[in-house]
Every structure is written in C-alpha cells, then in structure tokens.
C-alpha cells in the first residue's frame, strides 16, 4: 500500500480484510482445493499476519487502528465474532 493518504490503520484494515476473505473462501469451499492445501494457505496467512502485527516489537498497527478517527466505531469493534478476531487482538489463527 503506497499512498500519501494511507496510514498504519489502513494497513491493519487491509490485513483484516485479507484474512476475512481467505476465511470466507475456505469455509464456503468454493475453490475445491484439498484440505491440506487450504491448511497450508491458512498457516502462511497466519504466519505473515503474526509477523507483521501480533509478534511485532510494538503495537503500531493496533494503536493506529484504535486512534484513527476516520471510520471506526466501538460497535464495529465489539461485534466482530468468530475465528477472525476476538476483541481487538487478532488470534493466532484465522480459523
């Protein structure tokens, strides 16, 4: 993401959208991929999300997301359910 108008919050939202989309595609089984292939995909996505967000030396993405006044409401943060996110911190797995 390269833009003079984007910030760390946008990067975090991008990653949430990526994980949610992959989760939906795999759960709906629209690809016909074998389960071991989808497991490998999930592992790779989780690895990169954790490297960039959860296991980062600081919480720049979470902080930026929470401090961004442009588009997020407390209702959005409290209604996220399922395997994608529990509260604010992403779990170690998208499933």
Image (cartoon, grey):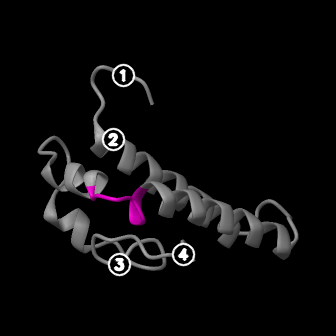
Image quadrant of residue 63? bottom left
Under circle 1, the secondary element is loop
Placement of 43 over or under 82, stated as above or below:
above
Q: CA distance from mark 4 to mark 1?
A: 29 Å
Counting residues from the start of the chain, the first of labels 4 and 3 encountered is: 3
For the residues bearing labels 1 and 2, Cβ distance under 8 angstroms: yes
Placement of 64 over or under 55, stated as above or below:
above
| Quadrant showing the N terminus | top left
Under circle 2, the secondary element is helix
Counting residues from the start of the chain, the first of labels 2 and 3 encountered is: 2
According to the image, label 2 marks what residue? 10
Between 87 and 75, the one lying in front of the other is 87
Counting residues from the start of the chain, the first of labels 4 and 1 encountered is: 1
Instruction: Locate residue 21 relative to residue 57 in the image: left or right.
Output: right
Q: CA distance from mark 1 to mark 3?
A: 29 Å
**What residue is at 49 percent from the left and 75 percent from the top?**
92
According to the image, label 1 marks what residue? 3
Q: Nearer the viewer, mark 4 or mark 3?
A: 4
Counting residues from the start of the chain, the first of labels 1 and 3 encountered is: 1
**What residue is at 44 percent from the left and 56 percent from the top?**
16
* Most common secondary structure along the magenta stretch: loop
According to the image, label 4 marks what residue? 93
For residue 86, which numbered disc appears in the image? 3
Counting residues from the start of the chain, the first of labels 1 and 2 encountered is: 1
Instruction: Locate residue 47 relative to residue 64 in the image: left or right.
Output: right
Residue 24, x across and y down, in percent: 60, 64
Q: CA distance from mark 1 to mark 2?
A: 10 Å
């Amino acid at each position: 993401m390269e833009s003079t108008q984007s910030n760390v919050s946008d990067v975090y939202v991008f990653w949430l959208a990526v994980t949610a989309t992959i989760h939906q595609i795999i759960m709906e089984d629209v690809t016909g991929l074998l389960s071991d292939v989808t497991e490998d995909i999930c592992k790779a996505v989780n690895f990169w999300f954790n490297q960039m967000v959860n296991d980062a030396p600081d919480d720049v993405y979470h902080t930026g997301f929470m401090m961004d006044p442009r588009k997020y409401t407390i209702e959005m943060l409290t209604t996220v359910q399922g395997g994608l996110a529990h509260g604010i911190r992403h779990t170690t797995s998208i499933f």
